[in-house]
Amino acid sequence: MQSHLQCGRYRLSIAATSRPLVMGILNVTPDSFSDAGKYHALDTAISHAEEMIAAGVDIIDIGGESTRPGSQPVSLQGELDRVMPLVYALRDCGKPLSIDTYKPEVMRETVAAGADMINDINGFRAPGALAAVAESDCALCIMHMQKDPLSMQLKPEYQDVVADVSTFLHERIAAIAQMNIARDRLCIDPGFGFGKSLAHNIALLKNIGQLQTSLDLPLLAGLSRKSMLGALLDKPVEQRLAGSLAAALAAVANGARIVRVHDVAETVDALTVWHAINQ
Ligand code: 9MG
């Protein structure tokens, strides 16, 4: 596998000799998954980003639309109004900015304004999504999702979840190659919680190594505070820190090179210790 991820202005090491990367979540959505709109105001969001930077974050993932199960879509202008001021405010913060969006227009505008990565829960399937990023140098996180955030958790079904997710990702990688987008710009994500039952999530988590080997690309795992942890622990979202750290460690132990998390300081500490022991 490649030893780096080309990420806009940055070239991030994803070699086994480096600590796995931490992507910090910066939501600017009033109905966001667990921060309940806390970071809606621009200055609060900037302070949160500064805290993440001080804690050792590697990538900041800015999201303007909640993707929690059952959430309603936001208009294009609504999403741009939330995300663009943060891109302008943070683009010189010294860390790569990722934009969590599936809308090609948001991809185009944020990349033109300095974003380094697009994190698309829809796997760049929207018409125009690949064209929006093709000419740039931004990284692409290609995620698997069954159905859409409104309906995905109603009755997720697979023949074989690991094989089905792998086939989907293979197909998306082939479509991306057709657009002449360099492979060192890509990472893959099985999409924990996006149209998956607890059993599906656990099967995917156990088989991260297989997915990564067969696709030969770095894998990003997003497990932080998710409902699978709530189901395992019977705890509300604000009591899932220990479960989130355990899940992040399990993901990197199985081969994930990037974890997407809410609790950056705690995750950086956990991964620093894990890496020192496993080098
Ligand atoms: C936006 N978002 C929410 N959960 C996610 C996950 O697991 N992976 C990625 N790439 N993005 C996510």
Image: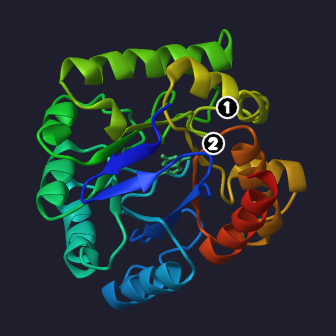
Q: Residues within 10 Å of mark 2 (few under 14, many from 20)?
A: many
Residue at the location (57% across, 33% down)?
Answer: 190
Image: 87 above or below 120 = below
Residue at the location (79% across, 30% down)?
Answer: 199
**On the image, which quarter does residue 141 sit in?**
top left
Rendered location of residue 208, percent (x, y) = 67, 31
Q: Secondary structure at mark 2?
A: loop
Q: Residue furthest right?
A: 233
Rendered location of residue 136, percent (x, y) = 15, 45
- Judge from the rendering whether residue 75 lies leftward or rightward of residue 7; answer left or right: left
Q: Secondary structure at mark 1?
A: helix
Q: Which residue is mark 2?
A: 256
- Earlier residue among tags 2 and 1: 1
Q: Which residue is mark 1?
A: 208
What whole-number distance in Å separates the C-alpha atoms at marks 2 and 1?
Answer: 7 Å
- Judge from the rendering whether residue 257 lies leftward or rightward of residue 4; answer left or right: right
Q: Check whether the beta carbons of the residues at disc 2 and disc 1 lie within 8 A of each other.
A: yes
Amino acid found under the numbered disc labelled 1: Ile
